[in-house]
Amino acid sequence: KAGMLWLRNRKNERVGGVQPGDLQFNQTGNTNSTGNALLDTLLGNYRQYRETDVDKWSYIRYSQVEAYIADTWKVRPNLTLDIGVRYSHLGAPYEIGNTLATFVPSAFDPAKAQQVIPSGAGAGELRPGVGQPYNGIVVGGDEYAQAHRTPSDPLAQNLFRNLPRSIMDSQNKFSPRFGFSWDPFSKGDFVLRGGGAVYYDRLSLIAVTAGGNPPFSNTVTLFNGNIDNLSSGRLASFPVSVTSINPDATFPTTYNWNLGIQKKLPFDALLDVNYVSTQGRHLLRRPDINQVTPEVQARNPSVNINALRKYQGYTSISLWEPSAASNYHGLQTGLTRRYSKDLTLSIAYTWSKVLTDASSDTSGVENLLDYRSERSHASFDRNHIFTATFVYHLPFFRGQEGLFGKLLGGWELTGLIQAQSGAWLTPSITTATGARRPDLVGRVTYLDPREVQTLMGGNNQPVTGNFYFDPTPGQLFATPPANRYGTSGPNVIRGPGRHNWDVSLFKNIKASEKFNLQFRAEAFNVWNHASSRNPNVNASSRDFGTIADAGSPRLIQLALKLVF
């Protein structure tokens, strides 16, 4: 068999900003202040006014073509093969007016860099008239495609560098797939199955909707003026943040394979046991390539951080890059019993592990010089997941005849049982040069959060509370020196697991041939078990290690439904 899919997609969205204007009233640094922020508001004496020059919209378009051919080959009565291949043309998204802009490090000229006032009056502001505002910015395409959306700034006319209008190229991919099913004993009660495939994913649209970057969106800031004459305030320019994408990026790739058995058991039960592996490559993440290292900050404690950045004129430069990887290995088991003798049962258990260096496509990198330190458990990794569902029709008075039949017949009991390991959590600590991961100096000692204890908190003071782990300073984490990163990786604390029972009792009442009533009594968290929420993992906090809240308590609801 064969098939084909052709898509042309369009997405129009507002980029954002503060186009309507944003006013802030406070007395700090406000030379027009009366000393009272409320009175300043009434008089219109603003501390800061910001406004984006345009209400920017992006009109994104992209195409996608998928074609496949597959065949199911019955080699023998007890052996079947599935073989196929898919071709994918993944069109890179573009903007119809050619208003996608990205930051390209090789296009940045340090000799033309803007300068940030390092300290004193105006610290953090840009020096007026110094440097090129769009240094390093490259616009996709070779010209602006719509005259009415062309930036008026003459400097914006020279930002084309032979990049495609989509910044990155469209890509063509081939995805082979293979699977087999083998009944080695030819009895129909035992089957061995396996297979593998390659999958490709297009880049998230948010990764390419860079229409909010300069020169297409600029924000003006005024200080210490009055709303009756906005321009009376002092005009100041600041470094800007940009979102960038690597023009050489490839599309995320997933390799999947599995091997398992399926066995019929007595009592109409079916057992499934499968090994499943998924390997992610070229996965997206978003490091800040303009970060300042703790060493540089520590050497320059009185200098504004934006004056220390590599690419002057910018604050953060968030670069979407497909440089992350992930590995999943899991044993997935299931036991199902089809409806028989009034009972339906399904049980599933998964034992698995996920390692990655980016838990999501917005994950950053704490130290640009050490990408390897980001590899750890995924934040969503759950080593153990158990789920069971059941439906039991009470076996008496099925016909609901007579008074006792009406009262005692037609009852149905259902339930959902869930239990799983907790999420992995990343600790943080505050240092003289900012917040980062701490030094890991010991092993996590987990405690029973149901007990109230008094321990030394993150501020070296005794704290009484419900502790999930021992927070004693120096036993688990320590504050790293101001001039380096901590030694702890991400996701080194396993959060609390959870288990929950939801039970429902239904009664189906045959009122007549056309009308039926259903009474429903449903209890969520029927045993009222307290599932702890995640603990405080800020090692500088007084409440480090404590849990302040639990999950939802038992909830019971009753309902009567008429079916006709």
Image (cartoon, rainbow, N blue to C red):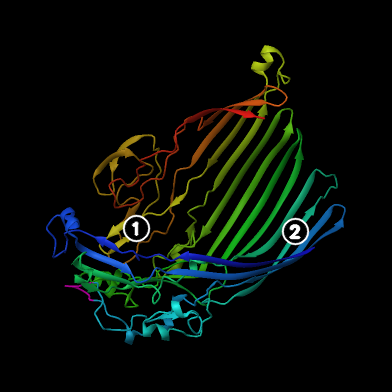
- Residue 179 tag number: 2
Q: Nearer the viewer, residue 308 or 400?
A: 400
Q: Nearer the viewer, residue 40 or 506?
A: 40
**Which residue of the protein is positioned furthest toward the right in this rendering?**
77
Nearer mark to the viewer, of 2 and 1: 2
Query: From where the camera sits, is residue 103 visible?
Result: no
- The residue shown at (32%, 36%) is 453
User: Disc 2 residue type?
Assistant: Gly
The magenta-colored residue range is 117-123
Q: Which residue is mark 1?
A: 438
Other-residue count near label 2 (Cα within 10 Å), few / some / many at <14 / 14–19 / ≥20: some
Q: Is residue 151 above or below residue 419?
A: below
In the drawing, does residue 283 fall left or right of residue 464?
A: right
On the question of residue 39 being in view, the answer is: yes
Outermost left residue: 34
Please state which amino acid type lies under the numbered disc 1: Pro
Q: Name the residue rendered at 64%, 67% in the picture.
A: 7
- Mark identifier at residue 210: none
